[in-house]
Image: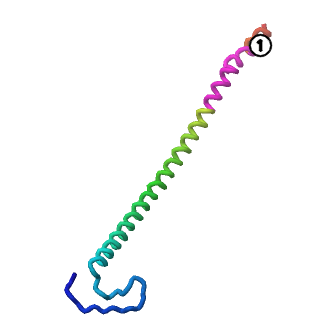
Amino acid sequence: GNGGGEVVVGRGKRRGGPIMEPLDKAAQQRQRRMIKNRESAARSRERKQAYQVELEALAVKLEEENEQLLREKVERTKERYKQLMEKVFPVIERRRPPRMLRRVRSM
């Protein structure tokens, strides 16, 4: 502590007891613990805030990536459909027979 001063105890029932009277050892430890706890809580809130910001940035990035992948999927689907249609209805065979028929008719 800091020497023996006169103890003025105001017995009005305020919350937390009288403020001006010197703190005994236990009260000092309680106060120190309270301060440490407050600082720890503040650090915890800062960490939570940073984590929140990080998660939001990640969400944006993943949404953009997802959009891109969906666009690529659409393109691939179109391409595959086109290839399938060409197998079912080959482009070349669709054009050749009429010419050959015309030539045959013209002769």
Q: Is residue 11 magenta?
A: no
Q: Is residue 79 above or below residue 45?
A: above
Quarter in which the N terminus is drawn: bottom left
Residue shown at the point (32%, 76%) measured from the top left? 31
| Residue projecting furthest to the top | 107
Q: Nearer the viewer, residue 61 or 12?
A: 12
Which of 6/69 is in front?
A: 6
User: Secondary structure under badge 1?
Assistant: helix
Magenta region: which residues?
Answer: 78-98
Residue at which label 1 appears: 102
Quarter holding residue 99: top right
Main SS of the magenta part reads: helix
The image quadrant that residue 18 belongs to is bottom left
The residue at 19%/86% (across/down) is: 3
In the image, 71: left or right of 99? left
- The residue furthest right is 105
Residue at point 27%, 81% (across, down): 24
User: Could you tell me residue 49's position as x and y percent?
Assistant: 43, 62
Which residue is at a point 28% across and 85% down the rendered structure image?
22
103 displayed left or right of 47: right
Please, what is the three-letter code of the amino acid marked with disc 1? Arg
Q: Is residue 95 magenta?
A: yes
